[in-house]
Image: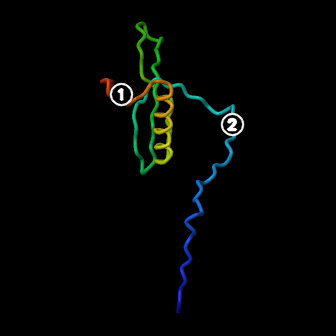
Amino acid sequence: MRVAIKSVPSSAPISAPTLPPLVDNPFAPEVFATGLAGLANLSGVIVLTLESARCDHTRDAPSVERVVVGRVALTSGAAQDLVAALNQFLEQQGLSPSKAMAAGSTFQ
């Protein structure tokens, strides 16, 4: 039995998959966070726990507390895309994380 293997011509470029159109939802919830409480890797799903500083005025001496305001769960690929896009955006805004770390800043 003879088998012929046909190769793909090298001149044919491999195109990136096209993304479906984005449908904007003006009613999507928006979360305001003043900090990142923590990160977790749950079987390949990266979970970011977001926090916000809140003042409790029910006490005689109001105190500021850290309150969990939301969680974002991303596939590992989406998390990598988020890091790359956020770093690029911060660079464009003059808020480079790498330059801040080189200058001695720490992130918590």
**Farthest left residue?**
104
Mark 1 and mark 2 lie on one chain; the one further toward the N terminus is 2
Residue 26, given in percent of the width and then of the height, sits at 69, 31
Residue beneath disc 2: 24
**Numbered circle sitting on residue 107:** 1
State the CA–CA distance, disc 1 to disc 2.
32 Å
**Farthest front residue?**
11
Question: Which structural element holds mark 1?
Answer: loop
Q: Nearer the viewer, residue 74 or 13?
A: 13
Would you place residue 53 above or below residue 18 in this image?
Answer: above
Whether label 1 touches label 2, CB < 8 Å: no
Residue 89, given in percent of the width and then of the height, sits at 51, 31
Q: Quadrant of residue 60?
A: top left
**What's the residue at 48%, 29% (across, down)?**
90
**Numbered circle sitting on residue 42:** none
- Indicate left or right for 25 with 8 as reference: right
- Image quadrant containing the C terminus: top left
- Indicate left or right for 25 with 74 as reference: right
Residue 13, given in percent of the width and then of the height, sits at 58, 59
Q: Nearer the viewer, residue 15 or 43?
A: 15
Q: Mark 2 is on which residue type? A: Asp
Badge 1 crowding class, 10 Å Cα cut-off, few under 14, some 14 to 19, many 20 or more, is few
**What's the residue at 32%, 26% (across, down)?**
106
Q: Nearer the viewer, residue 79 or 66?
A: 79
Badge 2 crowding class, 10 Å Cα cut-off, few under 14, some 14 to 19, many 20 or more, is few
Would you place residue 42 above or below residue 53 in this image?
Answer: below
- Indicate left or right for 21 with 74 as reference: right
| Scheme of colours in the image | rainbow
Q: Mark 1 is on which residue type? A: Phe
Residue 75, given in percent of the width and then of the height, sits at 49, 47
**What's the residue at 37%, 31% (across, down)?**
98
